[in-house]
Image (cartoon, helix red, strand yellow):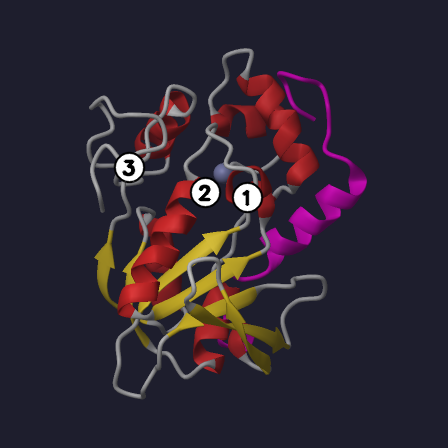
Amino acid sequence: MSPKSGRRAPLAIRSLLDAAQTTPRCATSDTDGVAIRNAVSVPLRDGQLASFVSFTGLAPGAEHFALRFGDLDVDSVPLVRLHSECITGDVFGSLRCDCGQQLQQAVDMMQSAGGVLLYLRQEGRGIGLAAKLDAYRLQDTGLDTFAANRALDLPEDARDYGCGAAMLKAMNVRRIRLLSNNPDKAVQLARCGIQVVERRSTGTYLTAHNRAYLKAKAEISGHSLVGLNESSEAGRPAVAG
Ligand SMILES: [Zn+2]
């Protein structure tokens, strides 16, 4: 029960979260049994081809997928981004967060340099879209993105990157250059046997609508957001990563 709201998360959400939280962040067995199901070339809007890769062996209902850009030979150390689903940002360009801009930057970089984008279906830092919108409503009353989740009796961050490690291993990728501002991703991947040779930050996409969100990510969850206090045009990086 939340002391602030007196509300509990719906039962279905709670059982999913309980299951996620009782699963080790990355036991070796997390990566066993994950294999490529299919890989299909898909032309993207700017004429580049990406190979969309689906998998078997992921947790039930976890329809994560990967986009491969260019050829991945055995010795390559590809640029990799683990991108957690954000329908509002990724599809509709919401300026409440920076997800859409980060996703586009990753695709742009990989189209020229090659790489692997893991698209992980863990919307709203793992709480789902409906709960994310509940949290947005609380954020509009002044709570930051983490406090809003706590007020709903939900975890601040329920994402798990062990599945990403399993997907990389299924594609024979063991060494990566990680594109991320989130230090927790590198830690979780290393724990799962993925060698992070380098971590590159993305740009800091500051808008009038996401300043408080980005500030909370930097101060509370330790994201490296260069230039956060600088002014920038809406949706353009204050500093390119
Ligand atoms: Zn977002």
Q: CA gap, disc 1 to disc 2? A: 8 Å
Mark 2 Cβ inside 8 Å of ligand 1: yes
Give the numbered dot on residue 204. Answer: 3
Mark 1 Cβ inside 8 Å of ligand 1: yes
- Image quarter of residue 73: bottom left
Q: x, y percentage for residue 76?
A: 26, 81
Give the numbered dot on residue 86. Answer: 1
User: What residue span does the magenta drawing correspond to?
Assistant: 1-29
Pick whichever of labels 1 and 3 is earlier in the sequence.
1
Q: x, y percentage for residue 4?
A: 62, 16
- On the picture, is 80 further left or further right than 44? left
- On the picture, is 132 further left or further right than 195? right
**Element type where label 1 sits in the image:** loop
Query: Which amino acid, mark 3?
Result: Thr
Q: Residues within 10 Å of mark 2 (few under 14, many from 20)?
A: many
Q: Residues within 10 Å of mark 1 (few under 14, many from 20)?
A: many
Query: Which amino acid, mark 1?
Result: Cys
Q: Does the segment drawn in magenta span residue 67? A: no
**Element type where label 3 sits in the image:** loop
**Which residue ends up furthest to the bottom in the rendered image?**
74
Q: CA gap, disc 3 to disc 2? A: 12 Å
